[in-house]
Image (cartoon, rainbow, N blue to C red):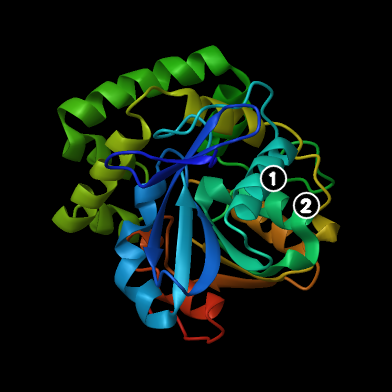
Amino acid sequence: MTPFSSSSGSGRVLRLEDGRRMAYREYGARDGWPVLALHGTPASKLMFSIAETTSAKLGLRLIAPDRWGYGQTDPHPRPSLEAWARDAAELIDALGLSQLSLVGISGGSPYAAATAALLGDRVVRMALAVPVGPIAATAVEHRLSLLHRLIFMGVGRRPGLTRFIFRAYRQLAAWKPRRAVSLVALGQCRADRALLRTPAVQDFLSTMLRDGLERGVQGPAIDLTLFASPWNISLERICAATRIWIGNDDQLVPLSAARHLASAIPNAELTELDGYGHFWIAQDYSEVLDWLAGNRLKVTP
């Protein structure tokens, strides 16, 4: 019996060895170079829908799963970054991929790093955009804003509070989707506030939010719990060529943690984008995808 099954409206579903479902969708060139694409928090596999045309032109095959608790993917009974890496390896093996690249956006970055650490030289390149970096139990003293302390040191350590907040946000996203996106703009930098007022971006983000939170709020609850905990993965085992992008005006993830992440991954290249916030990636993935395809272009504000 094949481990894959159809899932109407949401691509395909892999039945993992323990029976849990992992849903995913593919974008770009169907016979192109495979890239496992991991979405942010909260989001879904639809985060990469805007990359369809660019990926196809670059010869990339994006394989975008719903992470645990998002969309149609079941949560793990004992979630950890290492456990995610094992699930991702199961998907990769089921697809018959000997080598591939990775891209992690925001909250998908810790999961991408864990996967790269597990798979070693099977991962050729890894791109991390606006990443959540290690915060808890690191040798680095991070400068955390009040918002960062609230997200990563407060809410993230109280799963019940996380679920309460995201249940309310889920209801708002279903009832007034554009208002839910506008709420995110509060407290962001000028560039992000302008971007989040764009109707096309509002529609894209609200569709993705509704898809990701359709079955509940287990996804963000798992994410924030793991982000507030030690990663317990060996970043020094990553041998993929790695590039990290972070806006120096990002208000959602700590810049110091992204810098620490870049220093902990062997030979990682860090690109700090002057005047950019967290959401520039929601408009255009071409810079990141072009690098994954082997070329480099300069990002211009």
Mark 1 crowd level (few <14, some 14–19, many ≥20, 10 Å Cα): many
Q: SS of the residue at dot 1?
A: helix
Q: Quadrant of residue 266?
A: bottom right
Q: SS of the residue at dot 2?
A: helix
Q: Residue furthest front?
A: 1
| Image location (x, y in percent) of residue 245 | 55, 67
| Image location (x, y in percent) of residue 76 | 61, 26
| Image location (x, y in percent) of residue 59 | 44, 79
- Identify the amino acid type marked 2: Leu
Q: Quadrant of residue 239?
A: bottom right
Q: Nearer the N terminus, badge 2 or badge 1?
A: 1
Residue placed under numbered mark 1 in the picture: 85
- Residue visible at 26% across and 58% down in the picture: 195
- Mark 2 and mark 1 in contact? Answer it, CB < 8 Å: yes
Left or right: residue 163 versus residue 178 is right
Q: Which mark is residue 118?
A: 2
In three-dimensional space, the C-alpha distance between marks 2 and 1, rounded to whole angstroms, equals 6 Å
Q: Is residue 134 above or below residue 155?
A: below
